[in-house]
């Protein structure tokens, strides 16, 4: 009966459903005339969301729409990003001034003043920590802000930059510890793209950041954010598979057919590979690039088993069931493995972010809209301090082979063709940079490699904080702790005395302190390894996500919900299991791959790593045949 109902609805929507056009910022329905104005101005891509009528029984849409049935556009790209605290700007929406009325001290001067440069490996965490972290952030924010100043507006440090309002280069002070020896006095940067800069909102309103990623943890950086692009660039339309290519004995996502691609740093003629996946960000920095390749293969591993097990399922059904499993497994790893590693397991259980039980849970509240917070995106840039600048490569037995610069691999997918297996071995054998107050010199001075004469990723992060109009750091402290702060010394509960001194050297007044600077210098949360305000902002977002995402994988009542047996298999997803399934030459690994191998976490054969069994997805109505000969484990 229910099947008939779904079929009927699907049928109706095919024949006579008309899509509705919404204003991407307000979420209000647009009239035909209003849509025409956008078409004429060529602003439909950013300012208009086209949504087919929502069907409450339908699964997670690729474009994220209809996640919230009351607000159909929320959950899709180009929708507003939340602010935890109201914006604070100077006039004309320029960065706020210090309390004395002077501009705040230069971002570069603060960065070099409060964070030392050096290389200290961590003794606990592997490279997989920063890698997966960056990958998951790439699911909820697009990379166009970086592409903007290296490709679209490459002149911000030149004369021309002075006349382009989008250019906001960072000045380098004369006494800079590195550049007093060079002639470089400027670092490229462009203003964050906003609904205003894209022509969706008037310029005399508070800047609102705009993103091409969906604000949900739905792997939009793998599957893309529109059904159309996924169909054109991703799907094979056979057995639920994604399109792949084989090169140098390895399986890859499809490659770009034009030479004018985003892999600007490929060393021609030898390095030519560049992905043509639904989301171009896949070619960007190394970590998401690796994970997109692996996730692409993971999808096909699962689809292949489902299709062998359920011969009567069509391509569509296999594809979307597989996507649902892949998204759930990746979210399981993010919430239950990565975040418990860095935020602390007990902390997350206490906050209600994760469940101590393996069964279902349902915190859905349709009055909470699926959105990401601007602060969530910004404070996690702190993770730049735990990024090692060197990439070490190993053979399958763990013998060290060679190293290169991570920054040199940005926009350079071609390098992976000969080296992916050695890099893969490194992600779980090489330590992350230590969680301390020290930043790797490469990240701080050459962050984008040969793209730029110089680039300090943390200076850019801090500077963008100001253009986002964040309230002073102490307002966030107050939000998180309920305490008020009136002198620098009051910060002693969260910042060590010597680092309070550093703050006093750089900022005249307590209220001048920038959000990110505070986060850089904070003590770590008890039971975890991250700054207290970062912890607070991230936990807020995680709880919001699981209460606002109607398709959250732990819900028993969502459309096409997992059965209990299926959920229990998803719970077995782990980074070690994932790398054993799809990582090149991975035949042994430590069970906790976010931690370095060592006592209690010894390397073992992949056959000893717990796997996900897909048998609970067997459709007995399709074939009663046993699956004795089929390995249903991933
Ligand atoms: C229209 O907008 C799209 C998306 O921003 C852009 O790629 C394209 O170049 C624009 N076309 C014209 C004619 O400006
Ligand atoms: C706002 O300013 C930007 C450039 O700074 C411009 O491209 C855009 O068209 C302006 N938007 C409106 C609505 O005037
Ligand atoms: C990284 O790129 C820079 C600039 O092109 C180059 O000088 C350097 O040798 C490269 N380093 C490595 C290890 O490839
Ligand atoms: C600014 O960007 C352009 C284009 O990417 C680059 O050629 C130039 O070296 C950059 N300037 C600095 C100071 O890094």
Image (cartoon, rainbow, N blue to C red):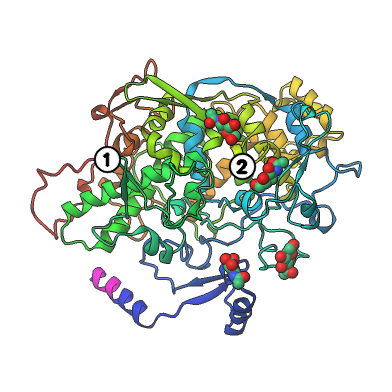
Residue 220: x and y, percent? 46, 54
Above or below, 351 against 432 in this view is below
Residue 439, by quadrant, is: top right
Does residue 3 belong to the magenta stretch? yes
Above or below, 576 against 209 in this view is above
Give the residue displayed 61% in from the left and 84% down from the top.
33
Q: Of helix, strand and loop, which one carries label 2?
A: helix
**Residue 170 located left or right of residue 72:** right
Cβ at disc 2 under 8 Å from ligand 4: yes
Asked if one can make out residue 510 in the rendered structure from this viewpoint, the answer is yes
Residue position for label 2: 451
Quadrant hosting ligand 1 = bottom right
Give the residue displayed 79% in from the left and 49% down from the top.
95
Magenta stretch: give its range.
2-7
In the picture as drawn, the residue positioned furthest to the top comes out as: 599
Q: Which one is nearer the viewer's eye here, 440 or 554?
A: 440
Circle 1 Cα neighbour tier, 10 Å, few/some/many (<14 / 14–19 / ≥20)? many
Q: Of helix, strand and loop, which one carries label 1?
A: loop
Predominant SS along the magenta part: helix
Q: How many marks?
A: 2
Check residue 443 in the rendering and tell me which mark sits there, or answer none: none
**Residue 212 located left or right of residue 196:** left
Residue 315: x and y, percent? 25, 62
Q: Which one is nearer the viewer's eye here, 447 or 64?
A: 447
Residue 432: x and y, percent? 51, 26
Where, quadrant-wise, is the C terminus in this rendering? top left
Residue position for label 1: 612
Label 1 vs label 2: CA separation? 42 Å
Above or below, 463 against 279 in this view is above
Where, quadrant-wise, is the N terminus in this rendering? bottom left
């Amino acid at each position: 009966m229910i099947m008939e109902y779904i079929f009927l609805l699907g049928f109706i929507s095919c024949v006579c459903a008309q899509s509705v056009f919404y204003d991407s910022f307000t979420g209000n329905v647009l009239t035909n005339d209003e849509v025409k104005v956008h078409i004429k101005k060529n602003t439909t891509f950013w300012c208009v969301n086209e949504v087919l009528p929502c069907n409450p029984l339908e699964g997670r849409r690729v474009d994220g729409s209809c996640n919230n049935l009351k607000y159909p556009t929320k959950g899709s790209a180009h929708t507003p990003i939340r602010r935890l605290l109201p914006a604070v700007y100077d006039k004309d929406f320029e960065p706020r001034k210090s309390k004395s009325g002077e501009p705040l001290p230069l971002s570069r001067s603060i960065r070099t003043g409060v964070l030392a440069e050096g290389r200290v490996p961590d003794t606990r965490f592997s490279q997989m920590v920063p890698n997966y972290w960056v990958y998951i952030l790439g699911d909820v924010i697009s990379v166009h802000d970086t592409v903007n100043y290296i490709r679209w507006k490459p002149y911000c440090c030149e004369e021309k930059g002075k006349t382009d309002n989008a250019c906001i280069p960072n000045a380098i002070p004369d006494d800079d510890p590195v550049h007093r020896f060079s002639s470089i006095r400027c670092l490229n940067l462009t203003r964050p793209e906003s609904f205003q800069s894209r022509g969706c909102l008037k310029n005399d309103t508070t800047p609102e950041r705009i993103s091409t990623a969906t604000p949900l943890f739905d792997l939009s950086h793998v599957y893309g954010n529109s059904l159309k692009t996924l169909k054109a660039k991703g799907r094979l339309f056979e057995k639920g598979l994604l399109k792949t290519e084989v090169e140098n004995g390895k399986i890859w996502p499809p490659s770009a057919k034009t030479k004018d691609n985003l892999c600007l740093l490929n060393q021609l003629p030898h390095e030519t590979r560049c992905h043509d996946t639904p989301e171009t960000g896949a070619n960007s920095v190394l970590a998401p690039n690796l994970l997109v390749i692996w996730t692409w293969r993971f999808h096909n591993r699962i689809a292949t088993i489902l299709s062998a097990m359920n011969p009567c399922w069509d391509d569509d059904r296999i594809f979307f069931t597989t996507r649902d499993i892949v998204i759930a497994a990746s979210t399981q790893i993010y919430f239950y493995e990565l975040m418990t590693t860095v935020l602390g397991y007990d902390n997350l259980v206490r906050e209600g972010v994760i469940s101590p039980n393996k069964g279902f849970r349902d915190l859905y509240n349709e009055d909470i809209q699926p959105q990401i917070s601007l602060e969530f995106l910004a404070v996690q840039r702190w993770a730049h301090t735990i990024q090692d600048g060197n990439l070490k490569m190993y053979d399958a037995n763990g013998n060290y082979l060679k190293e290169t610069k991570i920054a040199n691999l940005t926009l350079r997918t071609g390098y992976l063709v000969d080296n992916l297996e050695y890099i893969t071995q490194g992600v779980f054998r090489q330590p992350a940079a230590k969680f301390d107050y020290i930043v790797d010199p490469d990240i701080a001075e050459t962050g984008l490699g040969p793209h730029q004469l110089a680039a300090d990723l943390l200076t850019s992060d801090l500077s963008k904080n100001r253009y986002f109009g964040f309230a002073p750091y102490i307002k966030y402290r107050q939000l998180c702790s309920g305490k008020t702060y009136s002198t620098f010394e009051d910060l002693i509960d969260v910042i060590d005395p010597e680092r309070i001194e550093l703050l006093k050297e750089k900022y005249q007044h307590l209220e001048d302190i920038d959000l990110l600077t505070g986060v850089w210098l904070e003590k770590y949360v008890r039971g975890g390894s991250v700054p207290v305000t970062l912890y607070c902002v991230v936990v807020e977002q995680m709880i919001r996500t699981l209460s606002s995402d109607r398709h959250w994988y732990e819900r028993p009542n969502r459309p096409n919900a997992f059965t209990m047996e299926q959920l229990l298999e998803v719970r077995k997803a782990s980074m070690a299991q994932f790398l054993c399934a799809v990582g090149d030459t991975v035949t042994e690994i430590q069970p906790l791959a976010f931690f370095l191998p060592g006592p209690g976490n010894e390397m073992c054969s992949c056959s000893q790593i717990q796997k996900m069994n897909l048998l609970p997805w067997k459709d007995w109505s399709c074939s009663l045949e046993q699956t004795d000969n089929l390995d249903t484990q991933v």
